[in-house]
Image: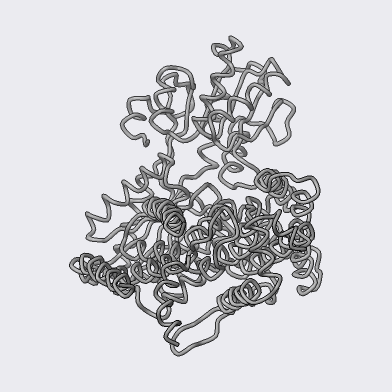
Amino acid sequence: MAVMEATLPRRLITTPVAGPAIALVLACLFFALNSPQFLTGPNFSLIIQQVMVVGTLAIGQTLIILTAGIDLACGAIMAFGGIVMTKLAVDSGLPPLLAVAAGLAVCAGFGLVNGLLVMKISLPPFIVTLGMLNVVFALTHIYSNEQTITDLPPLLTFLGQTFQIGQTNVTYGSLLTILLFLLFAYLLGSTAWGRHVYALGNSPEVARLTGIRTGRLTVGVYTLAGLVYGIAALLLVSRTGVGDPQAGQTDNLDSITAVVLGGTSLFGGRGLVIGTLVGALIVGVFRNGLQLMGVPSIYQTLITGVLVILAVAVDQLSRRRNR
Amino acid sequence: MNVRIPAGLLITALLVTGCGGGGGTQTATTTPKVGLITKTETNPFFVKMKEGAQKSAQANGLELMTAAGKFDGDNASQITAIENMVAAGVKGILITANDTKAIVPAIKKARDAGVLVIALDTPTEPQDATDALFATDNFKAGELIGQYAKAAMAGKPAKIATLDLAPGITVGQLRHDGFLKGFGVPAGDPSVVCSQDTQGDQSKGQTAMENCLQKAPDINLVYTINEPAAMGAYTALKAKGREKDVLIVSVDGGCAGVKAVQSGQIAATSQQYPLKMAEDGVKAVSEFAKSGKKASGYTDTGVTLVTDKSVSGVEAKDTAFGLANCWG
C-alpha cells in the first residue's frame, strides 16, 4: 500500500490524460463562474450530445493513431454511411434495421480497404486516407444526388430520443457514446489485442519479432475503426434527423483535434481512449461556454487552435523529461 | 515533494477562475438576447449582415450573440449554435441556413422552446419551418437582369452562358429561372449554350467561362450567380479579347461588384440588402421580447437593378446609388 501511495502522484503526472483532465475541469470552473446557464444538468447533457458524433469518430481515430497511422477519411466515411442508411430506409423502403446494418457494413468496408492499402502496398496512411477522403466524398454526392434525405423512420432517430435522469433529458446516443468509450478503454487497456495495438504503434518491427501478426492487426484496426464510423453515422443521423450529404467535412480534423487534446501521441503507441473523450469534451465545453458568454464562434476556432498546440507541446516536454 | 504539483495546479485553478469571476454575474442581467447564425464568418455579405444586426441590437437594447458554420453547407455547426443559443436563453434567432432541409428539426426544437426563429436571406424547406422570412426575392432579382439583358441585346440573337451556383441550392435555381423568365426564353432553350456551376467563386467562374468559350466561342451574353463569378467570367473573356462584345449581367450588389459595374466590366447587377434583412430581423425579435407578438410570413427586403447603361422600359438606379447602398 505504501508503495502505491508513493507512486500515485507520479503516475498522475506521467499519465497522458492528467493534463487534459485538469484543463477540462479548469475550463468548466471558468465557464461556471462566467455564465449562470453553464453549470446545469440540461446544459451538460447538451454538450455531450454536441460532442458525441465527433467523439465517436475520434474513438476510431484513436485506434488508428495508436498504430502510428492517421485517418483523414473518417468524416467522409461517416457521411456516406449516413446517406446509405437514410436512403435505403426512405427511398428504397428497406426495413430500417437492415438499412442501418448496410450502413455499418459499408463503413467497415471502407475501413477494410484503407487497412488493406496500408498493409499490402505499404502506402502511408496519410496518402491512403487522403485519397479515400476524396473518393468517398464524391461517392456521397453522386449516390445522394446532392439531396438531403428527410422523413426518417423512428428507428433511425431513436438514438436522438431522450430519457430522464432526475430533471435532465439525456439522449440514448449520449449513453451509447459513453458506453463505447468504456468498451474501447477496456479493449485497449485489458486485453491482449489492446497490448498488441500499443506494441504495433511503438515499433512495428519489434511487434512483428515478438510474434504479433502485424499485417492482420493493422487491417483489423482500420476495419474496426470503419465500423465505429458507422456507429457515428447513426448517431449523426439521429441527432440531425436527416441524411445530409454535406455532413462531416471538417470532422476528420476535428476528430484528430480531440485525440491530440486528449494527450495521445501522433507518433503512435502512447495515449488512452478516455483521453480522447476528455479532448472532445474540451472542444465542446469551450464552444458551448463561449457561446453562452456571447463570444463569436470564430474565437472558438482560435482557442481550439491554441489548445492543440499547447497539448502537443506538453506531450513533447513530458517525453523529454521522462528520458 | 510529489504533493506540491497538484497543490500548485489547484492554486492556478483558483487564480484562473477567480479572474473570470468578477464579470460573471453581469450576464444574468435582464437584457434580452438575440442570436444571429450566418452561413460562414468570412463572406462579406454576412459581415454586413452582422453589422446591421449589431447596430439594430444596440438601438433596440438587445444583446447580440453570433455564430456561423465553418464552411458553406456546414449544417452541424449551425445546429450546435441553435442549441447553445437556446440554452443561453435568447428570445429570437435569425438564421441563414446552410442546409435548408437539414436544419429544420433543430429549428423546430428551438421554436418548441418558445424562441422566435426568423430565416434571413435563405428560406427553409418548408418555408413555414421558421416563424418568418426576411429575404430578397431571388426570382425577381434574376428577372430584372433578364429583362435588362433582353432590352440591351436589342434584338440581336443571343448565345447565353449561365454561370450558376451549385446543384440543389434554391437561391441559385431561383435566380437562374428568374433570369430566363425575364429574358423570355423557356428552360432548356437552345439559346442557352452553356451552363456551369461556380459555387459563386471567382476562380471557378473563370474556369467555367473558359470551358464555355471552348464549347461555344460565339457566346455574347453571360448570366452569373454573383459578381465574383462575373469577374471570373470577365477575366476569361478578356484573355480571349472578347470583353467588349459580351454582355455580363449578375446578381448581389456587393461593393466590389458595383465598382465593376461602374467600370463597365459588368453591365448590370441586381442589388440585395443584407443589412436591412438583419436590421428588420432584430427589430422583430425586439418587438417579440416587448409585446410577445411574433413576426410571420415573408417580408421582401427589396432588390434594385444597378447599371450606368440604362435601357428603356426597365427601371434602374445608377452606380452612385449602388455604391451608397452596397455591402462588403
Percent from the top left, x then y, of residue B55? 26, 49
Percent from the top left, x then y, of residue A33? 26, 72
Percent from the top left, x then y, of residue A17? 47, 68
- Colouring mode (rainbow / by chain / secondary structure / one colour): one colour
* Outermost residue toward the top in this view: B241
Quadrant in the rendering for residue A90: bottom right
Percent from the top left, x then y, of residue B130? 48, 63
Q: Give above or below for B38 relative to A63.
A: above
- Using the image as rendered, state which of residue A91 and residue A233 is in the foreground: A233
Residue B290 in sight in this render: no
Residue at the image point whose x is 53% and y is 57% from the top: A265
* Lateral position of residue A107 relative to residue A190, left or right: right
Quarter the N terminus of chain A occupies: bottom left
- Using the image as rendered, state which of residue B126 and residue A296 is in the foreground: A296
Residue B27 in sight in this render: yes
Quadrant in the rendering for residue B47: top left
Residue at the image point whose x is 39% and y is 50% from the top: A302
Q: Give above or below for B190 relative to B82.
A: above
